[in-house]
Image (spheres, rainbow, N blue to C red):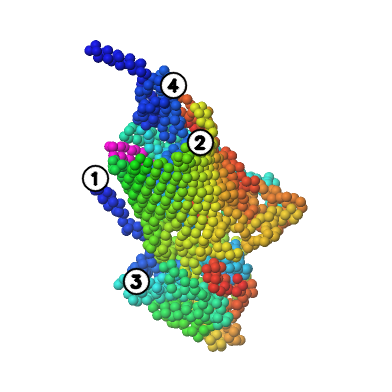
Amino acid sequence: MKLNIKLFFVAFLAFIFWACEEDLELQPEQDLSPEAAFANEAAANASLTGAYGRILDLDVFGAMPQIIGDFQADNVEFIGSFPTLQDINNSSVIADNGTIRTIFRDHYRAILAANAVIQNVPNVNDLGFSEEERAQAIAEAKFIRAIVHFSLVNLFAQPYTLDNGASPGITLRLEGAALIGDFPPKDRSSVSEVYDQIEQDLLDAVQDLPEVNGRVRASTGAANALLSRLYLYKGDNTNAADYAQRVLDEGNYELAGDYTFYNALTPETVFDIAMSSIDNSRTGSGGWASFYNPAEDGARGDCPFAQDLIDAHEDGDRRFDNLTQVGDNGRIYTTKFPDVVTNADNAPIIRTTEVYLNRAEALVKASNSIQQEAIDIVNMLRDRAGLEAFSASDFASADELIATILDERRKELAFEGHRRMDLLRNGESIINGLMPGDDQTVMPIPIIEIDQNSSLPQNPGY
Amino acid sequence: MKNVLLLFLAMSVSVVLYGQRTVSGTVTNVDGEPLIGANVTVVGEDGYGTITDFDGFFELQVPESAEMLDVSYIGYQALRLELGESNEYDVTLEESGVVMDEVVVVAYGEQTRRSLVSSVSTLDDKAVNNIPAVSPQEVLQGQASGVQIVQSSGVLGAATNIRIRGVASLSAGGQPLFVVDGVPLNDGSSGDYSNDFGGATTLNPLMNISMEDIESMSVLKDAAATSLYGSRGSNGVVLINTKQGKAGQNNVTFNTSYGVGGPTDLYDMTNSEEYYEISERYTGDPAPEDPNFFDWQDAVTQQAQAFKANLGFDGGDDKTRYYIGGAYTDDQNYIFGNDMEKYTGKMNLSHQVNDNFKIGANLSISRVTMDRINQENSTFAPLTSSYLQPPFVDAFNEDGSYARTGFIANVLAINDIGLSEFITRRTFGNAFLNYTIPNVGAGSIQIRSDWGIDEFQTEETIRWPEEISPGGYGYRRVIRDDKWLTTNTINYSSPIGERSNFSILFGQSFETALFQGTTVEGSGFAADPLRNVASAANPSITSATRTEWALASFFGRAQYDFDDRFFVEASIRRDGSSRFGPNNRWGNFWAVGAGWNLINESFMQNQTFFNELKFRASYGLTGNERVGNFQSLGLFGAGTVSDYNGQPGLRPIQPANPDLKWEQTAQVDFGVNMRIKNFLDLGISVWQKNTSDLLLDITVPESTGFSSITRNAGEMLNRGIDIDYGFDILRNSDWIFSLGGNISFFQNEITELPDATVDSDGNQFIQDPGTASQRAVLGRSANEFFLIRYNGINSETGDAEWLTKDGEATTSPVQGDRVFVGSAIPDFIGGVNFNVGYKGLNLSGLFNYTYGNLVMLDGLRFTENPASGFNRSTRLLDAWEQPGDDAFAPGAESSTVGTFAQRSTNQLMDGSFLRLRTLTLSYNLPVQSLGIDWIKNLSVYARGNNLLTITASDFRGQDPEVSDSGVNNLIQGESFFVVPQRKMYTFGINVTF
């Protein structure tokens, strides 16, 4: 009897310790660990794709910051009901504005996704992943990081030209420490420091980017075009003109013959954000088509033409005749983003037209004289619009020519998010008489960010 | 031969002369069940006694001089039987009502209340079935001290929020663990069981349990009771035991009932004339002549009807016991679009193979089909839309077809021609082997191996035809949560000497659950009869997901008692969970408890005041591991958001926290149980819980790319007093009158909240994004309302006024004027039950009450808004007209008309209430005396539920018992048109053959 008990005990104890430790090491199935996200070339490329996926977001390049770029200027009259956007429209923004917070947050999410790629791609353990491919992936991520930092500094900081970049800029994030649960507080860099970092990222990226990459991903043309925009905003006109020329010299980019190029990947497109019916930026809060189409079409109808913009168009301007519609409310809306139903319109971020305009403006500013090449560029655009050409004698001074270039720029790039910075960097006022340097000209750092780091300086007036 | 006969004659004569006879009979309880092993002894004569056998039958030689027999049985009142001429006596014993004799089911075992050192509340079969509850949580309301139950909504199948001894957690799950026959049930901690289409709250995961199958429920409250559940014991544990059948009988039970009912209360809304009267006052637009009026409230409500029937077979002999039962419920709520049909079946079987070896299995299957209301906080929900839809909007066009009613959808159309079906199926049960090794030392060893499963599946189908959603819309989601577990224990128990007992238990358990979900959604159907998403031209969701969880545990318990006076107990459990970070995979939880049964002390023998007196104390550690399955890992997510240009993508979604672990609660409990003068039973427990390592979503700078990380930080304190009382006022063979109840006081305070947001006054707090009214605040409770104070309508000016932070009256308050105005947590809660009976007639009832909590009725910001286009409450008719008026709504010219309905204490009111939850009048037909011996028991009853609710004088909502965020710890006591509880009148018959 005793022997039986002993045997039973031993067997039972063995049975008890049968549960293995490995059974507790379970992994999620819809998500991957950071190691798995960079385990091989395919995963690393998917992580890079994810960074693009992040900039497709409504609050990055999905229209929200871009409509601010037009209605806080003189292109759009905002008639929507969103209280947070109305505050921006009325220049009565407060630091806990929900839309501003979301824009801030989603930009930095994209930066983290890009940093994850930059940080981890060199260590991917896959022999099939060549050095060139790795360098390209890092270059594309740096492009994303640069364009997102640029979008942030434009919205949250005063223009470079105000004080040579001395104003407080934004917090630069250049590492992915957050992935491992490390959240070091970081101060805001100055505007010039931010510009320097963006410039560095783009110059690095140009080395390893391909010339052709489908027009919806980073390419040398996109990087050079963004550099020309950066230099132009900075006031470095020689470089601005130079880099614009580099883009045009590639031979991949040409002005379209008419205005049917929207939402098609033609040589007019330098860099678009690709949207599709199942993967686009539209949410209940908005989207390109949602903001810019009238309510009766199933959109929000928030952003019709401002009267000032209507008046700026001469009679017969095809940009007005071919690209507008009248809503039931009597207002005029653009037709650049017509797909209200499936929201598959691509978002235009960099176009050949802009590159030409960068060059024209930079040439005149750099030499402070009337440049024929600049006039030729203007005339190409006016010809496409069905308007008369200018000649050198039409301009009494370089400033008049610059004004005309800016005017054409306004009409060409309307509703694409450029106007606000085009006014501010030239010392002009935007909505409600705000000048560069005024408090409500720039957005506040979200209060929740200041709460986390009490030494982080807030923009004055908030 | 003659000598033998003569001897025999002499002996029998001597027997007659010396007065011995044989007395026999049966001993049963009031339900006719035989009591096995009851003692039958002769009074006054030693040496004459016996016990009853498996049929309750006894046979005893008694001396002729014997006049009385004592019949007794544990748990029952002893009976003194007068012996007369007859030699046959059938004795019925009444339950003793002595609380200490109660057998209490505890973790991995059973104890009598007398030997219990931990704090446990129990509900027996009668307490469970007296409430026509849909699920076990409802039954606990008012019937167990320290247990706060809030019915979050009157929607059938809505989850119930339970808090055992205070608020358990902030960010992790706060519900207790439910264990049925030793199987901890799946409770939705791996994933959501229902999506947002269902009622305001999530689905009640325990809805599939049939109440008729329940034998008893135990609520384990303190650490000594729950530490054997280790990392899941912090929130308390509810043990449910199902009927097993009793030896020596075979019963067939049939119960059926039918009830009708309606809402306890609804808002009083204006009709079209009143609506236009209000419009005219504030806008000056004249009211139209003879406006159209459609009574939406009337259209969406109907009579509630509930029909139930169940049939059960139970019984057994000395080797085998069984219970087989099936139940059917057909319930239609008083709001359309909320019906439920429930089928359940149960089979419990156990068999004693030989003296040492016992096997058994319990199995339960169920299927519940529901037609579910849309989310209550939505214009698609019937009752909500009836409060928002203006009364002049008609549901029908001239030609009788359904009208398009604009922003607020035509819920009549959706209910009539749309499909919204929700089916849940559950199969759970366990099988066990029990091997007893007797005669090991002075005691025995019991080895038990138990295997259990819980398979839960829900299917949700929604289909809206062309008329509701152009092009048609279809949706289907199927989820499964499958659990299996094994528990193996070895228990040695033995008396030591004559006065002590000792037992020790070792156990091991492994539990794992797999959650899988499949969702498809699409639009663009060629025709309405095409029901399924396969026919949709535009699929918008195609998703299949899977997630898994596992828990491995070792546990042990030792108990020692001495002389029936001193009891000591210690337990320990070691849990390893897949949910915790790799640095903290395993945790240890332990508890000690002691009890002192004073009543058996020598110095207590001569007093008659106390019949029972016992002190107990316990201290221990338990945990809460209800975090997501993978919250400690750094994660990159796939899916559409990560994709770009048709390529699959991955993006960072969660930062890593390898140190993540469970929340830990240290609890101390002191209690005393007493019975005074055979009249009053009183139990008092004083307890305190310190929860540390609270799981919090700590905000991090958003410039890092994340918004928050889950960390163990934060501490919270709960303390309180639980009192259970019972008065045994009258108990004899004809009359019974008893009164009992419980009351629980508790306080909750957050003692540490690191890295929380700080407001302008320096208060640290956490606020769930789903609420704009309440916060969890350091130094205050987890549910503090933070609002602008409303000061009423100024009788001189007709303006609405609020108070600034400093207490000055103002007509234009700002967000900075918000102050702390009270908590959603009550000061005390409790219940009272009474039972009056005369022979077979019985009247019993249960009141439950809660006091000191506030509720926020968000919906009033819409219905009491004179400036909105939504429907209006009739209260707005009481508007200010001239100086000196005391009115509810502002004057027509006031500047505050547009801001009158802003969020403030105007919508916050006292949620205290007293409710008559159940009142039952029943009659037990005296079938025995009528000579119908094939029926053992027949009773009929009439029952009312929620008949009477007494609320605070300023309460103007529908139902004070409301919490539309269900089980969310950070949002309690808020309502946006939550469906109120219902009043029911039910008639039923119970018969046992």
The magenta span reads B348-365
For disc 2, the chain is B
Label 3 to label 1: alpha-carbon separation: 61 Å
Could you tell me the amino acid type at mark 3?
Val
Q: In which quarter of the image is the N terminus of chain B?
A: top left
Read off the residue under disc 4: B931
Label 2 to label 4: alpha-carbon separation: 43 Å
Q: In which quarter of the image is the C terminus of chain B?
A: top left
Label 3 sits on a secondary structure element that is loop
Does residue A368 lie above or below B17 as drawn? below
Predominant secondary structure, magenta span: strand
Of marks 1 and 4, the one in the foreground: 1
Q: Do the residues labelled 4 and 3 touch (CB within 8 Å)?
A: no
- Residue projecting furthest to the right: B883
Read off the residue under disc 2: B608
For disc 1, the chain is A
Could you tell me the amino acid type at mark 4?
Gly
Question: Looking at the image, which residue is at 36% across and 60% down?
Answer: A27
